[in-house]
Image (spheres, rainbow, N blue to C red):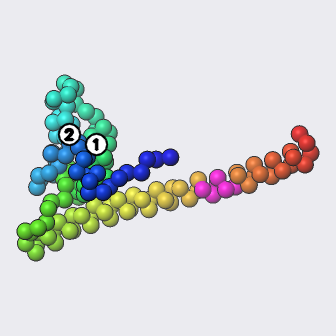
Amino acid sequence: MKKKIDQSRKAKEKFDSPILPFLQGDERIDKKTLSYHLSQPMMPKPLDGRTVREKISEVSLYYPVLSSSKKKGYRLARPFKGFSLKEAKDERSEVRETANEIMSRINYLKRKLKPLIAYDKAISKYIAELEQHEASYGN
């Protein structure tokens, strides 16, 4: 069972990641650049893309991380107090674009899950029949 993530303000304040400062600018930063920056203090070999994505995923549990197939890289949603109307609408548009892409992936995964659920139900029914058959014949 997965551990529930505490997403309270207090947990967010305690959360720390070496990747966080690189995501806090106005410009997006790509995986290759993040890999380079994260590897420098720790090791000479750059981190692989999967590790960088995992670190970004951890951050996204506490902060709104923007990414999309239309724009390369990642960044945090910016604090919006003081935005002009256009800036606020542009930021909201990027947030919605990211959310829509995530929802699209969720819906795709749900479609992939349906045959597995159907198979599980069918085989569970079959197992129950086998168990009942064995019980009634004492095998």
Q: Residue furthest bottom?
A: 85
Near mark 1 (Cα within 10 A), the count class, few <14, some 14-19 or many ≥20, is some
Task: Look at 35% across and 59% down and name the residue there.
Answer: 102
Pick whichever, 84 or 67, lies toward us.
Answer: 84
**Residue 96: where, in percent of width, then height?**
27, 67
Total of numbered circles in the picture?
Answer: 2
**Residue 29: where, in percent of width, then height?**
16, 47
Q: Residue furthest top?
A: 44
**Residue 91: where, in percent of width, then height?**
17, 66
* Residue occupied by mark 1: 55
Q: In screen coordinates, is 54 left or right of 113?
A: left
2 or 1: mark nearer the eye: 2
> Image quadrant of residue 37?
top left
Which badge, 2 or 1, comes first in the chain's sequence? 2
Dominant secondary structure, magenta: helix
Near mark 2 (Cα within 10 A), the count class, few <14, some 14-19 or many ≥20, is few
Q: Disc 2 residue type?
A: Pro
CB-based contact (under 8 Å), mark 2 and mark 1 = yes
Task: Look at 70% across and 55% down and name the residue there.
Answer: 122
Q: Disc 1 residue type?
A: Lys
> Which structural element holds mark 1?
helix
* Residue occupied by mark 2: 18
